[in-house]
Amino acid sequence: MIEIIPAIAVMNNKVVKVAQGNFENVVVYEDAPIDVAQKFQDAGIKRILLIDLDGAKKGVIVNYTTLEMISRYTKLTIDFTGGVTNDGDIRLAFESGAQRIAASRIAANYRELFNQWIITYGREKIILAADSRGGKITTGDWTSTTELDVIDMIGYYHERGILHVKSTDLSKDGQLKGPAVKFYKEILEKHPDVKLIASGGVRSAEDIRTLEKIGVSSVVIGKAMHENLIDLSELSEIMA
């Protein structure tokens, strides 16, 4: 059964959506992060992805108090990403209530440190954030595109113990035109043992079922849920 992970992206203490990693294209939603989290919990969701967009821009965790609040006042399991760039950041995230950490900048630029995190915290606690544009890894706030091939980097870390990989094709992100199914198939054909977390473009329950059929372990949903394009009752049927 595929795991459904709603995303809550936070900037300036607001729930937002940044399409295709473009900070000039920001949609701000009215509900507070904790209210959104509680709504997901009430619908039967077990896990969310909390994205610290301020942290991603600044390269240091900013919204740890939001993480603490959601951890304290809900029973949700929280994946956290954004601004985790050193040992202090990752300790702060775990101490504030995160169960798993997803990182891209460190994985791309400081491989020895990221490998050490896998060893120190275990492969169930660390997620490789392999977000890409045109097949090349993007880092931090998604404005920096490297020359690193996304599938090659997944292979490098999989050989070193990584299990969970979150991958966003930024050309699909926020567009509500369907996920990058062909891209995810390619990842799973080359690295079938990876537990792939697909992110970007999901617009319907049918998209989720398609990803499940090709072997995707989890799916992150953002805009489609915040704008009620996917009814929470539909998700309950998939999770049943």
Image (cartoon, helix red, strand yellow):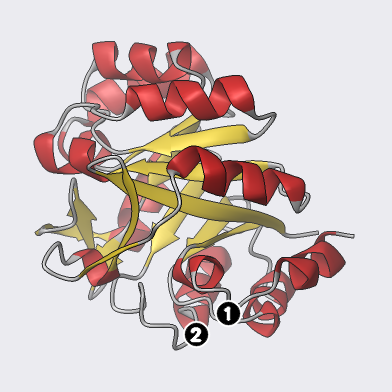
Q: Nearer the viewer, residue 190 or 173?
A: 173
Tell me the number on the disc at residue 170: none
**Residue contact at pointers 1 and 2, CB within 8 angstroms:** no
Q: Where on the picture, by quarter, is residue 41?
A: top right
Q: Which of 146 and 66 is in front in this view?
A: 66
The amino acid marked with disc number 1 is Leu
Q: Where on the picture, by quarter, is residue 201?
A: bottom left
Which residue shows up at 22% across the image and 19% down it? 86
How busy is the neighbourhood of tag 1: few (under 14 within 10 Å), some, or many (20 plus)? Answer: some
What secondary structure is found at the residue carrying circle 1? loop
Q: Nearer the viewer, residue 154 or 42?
A: 42
Q: Where is residue 122 in the image (x, y as percent from the top left)?
A: 54, 20
Asked if residue 164 can be seen in this view, the reply is no
Q: Position of residue 17 (x, y in %)?
A: 33, 62
The amino acid marked with disc number 2 is Gly
Q: In this view, does 64 lie to the left or right of 176?
A: left
How busy is the neighbourhood of tag 2: few (under 14 within 10 Å), some, or many (20 plus)? Answer: some
From this view, report whether residue 117 is shown above or below residue 197: above
Q: In this view, does 159 lie to the left or right of 193?
A: left
Q: Is residue 197 left or right of residue 233?
A: left
Which residue shows up at 52% across the image and 80% down it? 181
Q: Position of residue 109 (x, y in %)?
A: 15, 37
Which residue shows up at 28% across the image and 70% down it? 19
Q: Judge depth for marks 1 and 2 and give the one in front.
A: 1
Q: How many numbered tags mark residues here?
A: 2
Q: Which of marks 1 and 2 is nearer the N terminus?
A: 2
Q: In which quarter of the image is the C terminus?
A: bottom right
Q: Position of residue 2 (x, y in %)?
A: 73, 60
Q: Kindly identify which residue carries mark 2.
A: 178
What secondary structure is found at the residue carrying circle 2? loop
Q: Kindly identify which residue carries mark 1.
A: 229
- Rounded to the nearest whole Å, what is the CA distance between mark 1 and mark 2? 13 Å
